[in-house]
Image (spheres, rainbow, N blue to C red):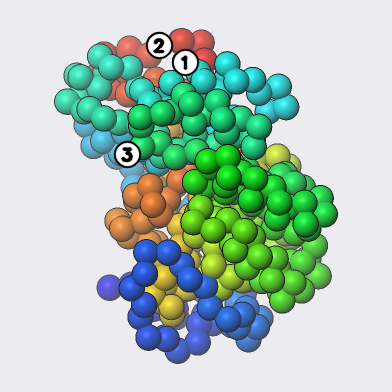
Amino acid sequence: MPRTHTEDPANLCTAPAALPQLAHPRNLGIPLDPGWVRRAAVNRSAAERRCATLPGRRSVKGSIQAAWLLKAVSLIDLTTLAGDDTPGRVRRLCAKARQPVRADLLDALGVSGLTTGAVCVYHEMIAPALDALAGSDIPVAAVSTGFPAGLTPFATRLAEIEASVAAGASEIDIVISRRHVLTGDWAALYDEVRAFRAAAGPAHLKTILATGELGTLTNVARASLVCMMAGADFIKTSTGKEPVNATLPVGLTMVRAIREYHAVTGHRVGFKPAGGISTAKDALVWLALIKDELGDRWLSPDLFRFGASSLLADIERQIEHHVTGAYSAAWRHPLG
Ligand SMILES: O=C[C@H](O)COP(=O)(O)O
């Protein structure tokens, strides 16, 4: 039974009465509801108190921990977004996505067929990624719309999405215009995301809020709602390039917005924390947050991803420790 809005002061407390439930695999979006957006508000200290309880309450050890870590691997958007990316680096990353954990370790755990959730690259690296992932089910995600700042001309941003979809990306990670949030121009944000969603066509749209640049958790909650109303398939915290990226209070705010949006519209929207998530311990805390707030249905690649360039290396080290009793040196895991 989901908690009601009155049980926790960090909740948004603002949803209108539930609309008829819709059964559809993608979020169709709804008309912009400015009243719902304006009423969204987050109490930062309550959110921080709630997040402070997470690491202790859900500590898992031994084989249960290994199982959670394997689950985390399957939820990673294995990412390289560097100015010096080359086809060779992307091919190596894709090899890692196909075989994210050493075969002997997986054999010892009786696991087969494990891959990461996706590979995430810039547009120019879509072709080598597709080539290296041929024959697998691993999707290629492309960052888009003038990533990371999102300040290129609007027509260019739309064309960028269309070009990445035409090149074979099945997931598009767009950045929103932060100024629309900072000036409270929710209609402009809604129209922008709606246009991005149309340009993406069948590709799934992840909307990056760049929460470290939005000022307040209330802005994060409002921007989350607007992106979902405009049809986002996922809401994502950060580009990884802001000074502050994925934090737990931001994550709590966004998943509460997802929960509320689902309760009202029946649409399930995915969540992708990204930026600075680099340890197995961090990953377990994020998974605990999702399990607590959204439930097991969200612990699946269609509804949850980690955006991470270095998380996999630490997870693999922890799995190796679980299997062998010894840690390997970090340099043995140069990618991921
Ligand atoms: O979307 C993914 C992020 O850019 C990855 O950030 P990270 O390099 O801090 O893991």
Residue in the image at 58% along x and 16% along y: 88
The residue carrying mark 2 is 328
The residue carrying mark 3 is 71
* Callout 3 crowding tier (Cα within 10 Å): few <14, some 14–19, many ≥20: some
Labels 3 and 1 touching (C-beta < 8 A): no
Decide if residue 195 is on the left or right side of residue 171.
right
First in sequence: mark 3 vs mark 2: 3
Cα–Cα gap, marks 3 and 1: 19 Å
Q: Quadrant of the N terminus?
A: bottom left
Labels 3 and 2 touching (C-beta < 8 A): no
Name the amino acid, label 3.
Lys
**Of 211 and 289, which appears nearest the observer?**
211
Residue lying furthest left in this view?
A: 110
Q: Is residue 56 above or below residue 268?
A: above
Decide if residue 108 is on the left or right side of residue 93.
left
Residue 202, percent across and down?
49, 56
Residue in the image at 28% along x and 17% along y: 103
Labels 2 and 1 touching (C-beta < 8 A): yes
**Which mark lies nearer to you, 2 or 1?**
1
Residue 302, percent across and down?
39, 52
Residue lying furthest front in this view?
A: 166
Residue 192, percent across and down?
70, 65
Q: Is residue 110 above or below residue 189?
A: above
Cα–Cα gap, marks 3 and 2: 21 Å
Residue in the image at 54% along x and 37% along y: 120
Name the amino acid, label 2.
Ser
The residue carrying mark 1 is 333
Indicate which disc residue 218 carries: none
Tell me the element at label 1: loop
* Residue 152 visible at all: yes
